[in-house]
Image (tube, rainbow, N blue to C red):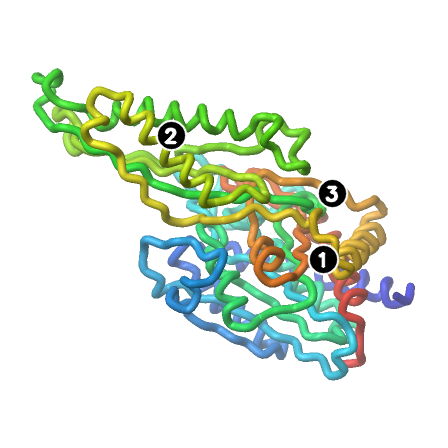
Amino acid sequence: MQTDLKTRLFDAVDRAFDRQIAFLAELTAHPSLRGQEQSAQDFMAAELSARGYEVDRWQIDVEDIRHLPGFSPVLGPYEDAVNVVGTHRARTRKGRSLILNGHIDVVPAGPLDMWDSPPFEPRVADGWLYGRGGGDMKAGLASNLFALDALTACGVAPAADVFYQSVVEEECTGNGALACLARGYTADAALIPEPFAEQLVTAQLGVIWFQVHLKGLPTHVAYAGSGANAIEAAIPVIQALHEMEHRWNAAENRHSDYAHMDHALNLNVGKFQGGDWTSSVPAWSTFDVRMAIFPGQSIDAAKAEIERVILDAARGNDFLRNALPEVVYHGFHAEGYALSEDGSERAASAIAALDQAHHTATGTPLVREAITATTDARFFGLYADTPALVYGPRAEAIHGFNERVELESMRRVTKATALFIADWCGIEER
């Protein structure tokens, strides 16, 4: 790439950076929790349309994707699950096509009094933007968009088709990204700017969500000995699941990208409900679990072991052996994905292009890192033969209180992304 264009792209990002921060603040102010993403998606569609992109906004139909590999089961309605894609159509199509993917949905904020400032009233302080979703991952959506804006400001455009995706459901199923594939959006590579501190993600874990339903025998607490407490009955079941977690993390079971990590797989009991009355022995309980798996680890085999562990623990309990738990799957049904295992020329070329773009933008080598979370990269890498590069800005307290993203990191990622697009896609005159 010509040095002159690099300089002009960097200058264009700098000139527009105040507007980029304002864009991020406005987007973060939309409380795009699951099922409430519509206003944020309206905002994204309007921004893409104003820039002249071909905008596709559609409601996901579960029946269109239920049969596809990577689909995650859902419990609730999908009437409000809306994706937005903005398409740049190249004139020459002499370059390599690209998907710029990001998710608009955010996780719940939790007790508001535990935030220093309201989570959906973003504020900038000391070089950081604070707010739920600012880091995970609306700063990435901003960097993707303003990287394209930088090319436009320089009078050039990608010489290949580019699909800018703002999807729902990343935080619970990934079905939004899957719906994009089902709709025909494919490309030679994908870039997903998740907030992993300007590092390239070499591998990510898979995730399984499930619920365990227990039933007890209700009675007045004065006669508790004659009942069966469905809340207390969960304790040995949870303990058995943690013992399974320990086995899965054993050195001999680890994927090579995680060989250096003693505890990459985490089991989390994220939600617990049970009982109806304080002075009644609870007749029921339900708890929700998130369990991770390594790349290459079979979901079906993992589910079979989960169910076996739960049932074995139940059969060792005086009450549960006569009222065996029920396991219900909903939400994440995600395989792990390792970019490091993609030996294709396209993957090597995409990584090299991002490596060079990052080094030019930051002056430092691109660090590779395996992460203990999951992203939508798996859909492109596993099911569409598309190398998926996860590379985004530095953020802190994602999914926690006082979530924040470092603005200078977002600036650097935007510059690197602009360079990567120009290199990967090539450029043509607007």
**Residue 363 spot, x, y in % from top left:** 85, 47
Of pointers 1 and 3, the one earlier in the residue sequence: 3
Of the two numbered discs 1 and 3 in the rendering, the one whose residue sits closer to the viewer? 3
Mark 3 neighbour density, 10 Å: few (under 14) some (14–19) many (20 or more): some
**Residue 336 spot, x, y in % from top left:** 57, 46
Is residue 19 among the parts visible in the rendering? Answer: no
Tell me the tag on residue 368: 3
Relative to 134, does residue 418 appear above or below in the rendering?
Answer: below
Report the amino acid beneath label 3. Answer: Arg
Q: Which residue is mark 1?
A: 414
Tell me the tag on residue 309: 2
Nearer the observer, 183 or 428: 183
Asked whether, in this view, residue 249 is left or right of residue 369, the answer is left
- Quarter residue 389 falls in: bottom right
- Quarter residue 269 falls in: top left
Report the amino acid beneath label 2. Answer: Val
